[in-house]
Amino acid sequence: MSVYDHKPVWAGAHYDPASAGGEVTRLDLYATPERDGPVVASTAPAARLRAGVYRFDVPVVAPGRYWGAVTFTPNAAAQPVTDTSVRLDLPTSQGLVGSPEAVADALGVPLPLSSAQRGAYEEEIRNAQADVAAYLNRPLVPTATTLRAVTPYWTDALDDIDAWPALLDDIAEVITYRANPDGTYDVDLLVGLNGAQEETVVRYVVAHAAESVRQRPDQRGPGRRVSSVSAEGQSISYESAPTTGQAGALPTINSLNRLRRLVFQPLSRPPRAPWPYSSGRLRRWR
């Protein structure tokens, strides 16, 4: 089962229908961007996670790219409208910050992908993620946890992580909360860096996964940069990737510096001289 978190767009802005008496009703998935063929899958209704964010449980479908249409009513007095900005690469919730289809787009490989292509692209995505996780000193997939029977510091902004008594040493995000009969709450959190929601991380991982595939000796057809071909077609020369600073160059790891998790350690000090020669010993008063 995959999940999709949707942010409704209305009148050119992100909008929360529930605040005006509206609701998000359904998600329809199509196999083509024209959305004029049969509906591949539908799911309804959406669960409101927090202000402006609604979660759909997507039925199991064949892996691949789908185009969606979300139907919602902006307010209690409005007619239903359709948001066609949805494009999903399924399945989600696999621990990957990018999709094989995104790598195929970067390579110019036509869709749909074969099972062999999908497996190869997923392998390179995981390799790129491992490099990013090592550089950032943190995993790219957050951990779900629940605070039980807690009392918020205030009740006017329960979506704010600072409203809850959570002693955490990492990024945390409130997913949802539930009121208990005794006035306390159970709060579901995501703790850690959510790489799939960080555009810089997604761009880096997808770009480097695509480049790793491009440089494979067995890569044929779309993807490799051809610089010249002999008249008889007996030899082909391939271009290397653009260097840093050139248009189309790969993003550098330094673009992720703001997400690094710093580990502080005490500075090593030379051993102290024995008393009474050490200046660090407390002074004795007579």
Image: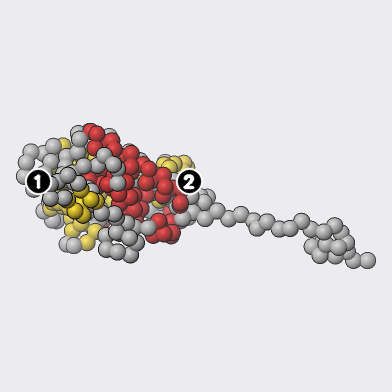
Q: Which residue is mark 2?
A: 150
Quick one: label 2 or label 1, which is nearer the N terminus? 1
Mark 1 residue crowding within 10 angstroms, few (<14) / some (14–19) / many (20+):
some
Q: Residue at x 76, y 56 (%)?
A: 271
Mark 2 residue crowding within 10 angstroms, few (<14) / some (14–19) / many (20+):
some
- Asked which secondary structure carries label 1, the reply is loop
x, y (%) of residue 66? 17, 43
Q: Nearer the viewer, residue 66 or 270?
A: 270
x, y (%) of residue 175? 37, 47
Q: Residue at x 23, y 58 (%)?
A: 15
Q: Which mark is residue 236?
A: none
Q: Nearer the viewer, residue 150 or 38?
A: 38
Q: Nearer the viewer, residue 270 or 20?
A: 270
Location of residue 239 (image quadrant) = bottom left
Q: Residue at x 14, y 46 (%)?
A: 233
Q: CA distance from mark 2 to mark 1?
A: 45 Å
x, y (%) of residue 238? 24, 51
- Looking at this view, name the residue that lies furthest to the right: 286
Q: Which residue is mark 1?
A: 35
Q: Quarter holding the N terminus?
A: top left
Q: Is residue 221 visible to the viewer in this orientation of the structure? A: yes
| Tag count | 2
Dot 2 amino acid type: Val
